[in-house]
Image: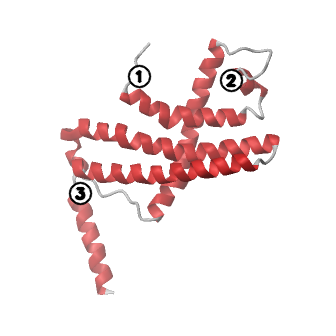
Amino acid sequence: MQDITTKNFGLLIAYILPGFLLLWGGSHHSLTLQGWLGQTSDELPTVGGFLYVTLGSIAAGMMASTLRWLVIDTLHHWTGLRQPPWDFSQLADRVSAFDTLIEIHYRFYQHYANMIVALVGCLLLRWTAIGFRVGEAVAVLLLTSLYGVASRDTLRKYYARVAGVLGTSLMAEARVDSDEDDREST
């Protein structure tokens, strides 16, 4: 068995944990998922169930990540948190530093933002099966608020630190300067 490393820990928190939460929410509607998770009294968790849960968690985590890209990334960008114009011509000499920043910042951003999607999805799946619960709604509201603040902070740090490693593209800077000149002339 391979030890937990920075790389596989990042993938675990970015995709598998949010995906597992969505599977658990979906188990309120599916006897198959309940069996995989060992929630039914007549079935104990099996090796096959573990494999299915792992693969299902990855798939659900990727779906959460896609929704995160569509909703949360867009929201962050609309509210002023934009990716700087990085100079990727510098990447070849700085791949190790870039990879490190992905693992120590971007994977945590993915976790926080994907968990927002997973929490809301899980709650909706659960509520459609068992009904609305005020306590759950309050808990999810608090957790999604916390994850929202954390996601914005880690994404901001990631953007700033990658800009420090890669610098900014001269073409992008020229485009920004041109846009500023256009605004000044109007």
Residue 70 visible in image: no
> In the image, residue 155 lies at what x, y percent?
40, 51
Element on which disc 1 rests: loop
Q: Circle 3 is placed at which residue position? A: 169
Q: Would you say the residues marked 1 and 2 are in contact, meaning their CB atoms lie under 8 Å apart? A: no
Residues at marks 3 and 1, CA–CA distance in whole angstroms: 36 Å
Mark 2 Cα-neighbour bin, 10 Å: few <14, some 14–19, many ≥20: many
Residue at the spot 52% in from the left edge and 48% down from the top edge: 147
Q: Is residue 41 above or below residue 166?
A: above
Residue at the spot 47% in from the left edge and 59% down from the top edge: 76
Q: Circle 1 is placed at which residue position? A: 4
Mark 1 Cα-neighbour bin, 10 Å: few <14, some 14–19, many ≥20: few
> In the image, residue 152 lies at what x, y percent?
44, 54
Element on which disc 2 rests: loop
Picture disc at residue 37: 2
Image quadrant assignment for residue 126: top right
Residue at the spot 27% in from the left edge and 53% down from the top edge: 86
Closer to the camera: disc 3 or disc 2?
2
Farthest residue to the bottom: give it: 186
Residue 83 visible in image: yes
In this rendering, would 22 be left or right of 31? left
Q: Earlier in the sequence, mark 3 or mark 1?
A: 1
Residue at the spot 30% in from the left edge and 74% down from the top edge: 179
Q: Check the picture and name the quadrant holding the C terminus.
A: bottom left
Q: What amino acid is labelled 1 in the image?
A: Ile
Image quadrant assignment for residue 94: top left
Q: What amino acid is labelled 2 in the image?
A: Leu
> In the image, residue 107 lies at what x, y percent?
42, 39
Q: Earlier in the sequence, mark 1 or mark 2?
A: 1
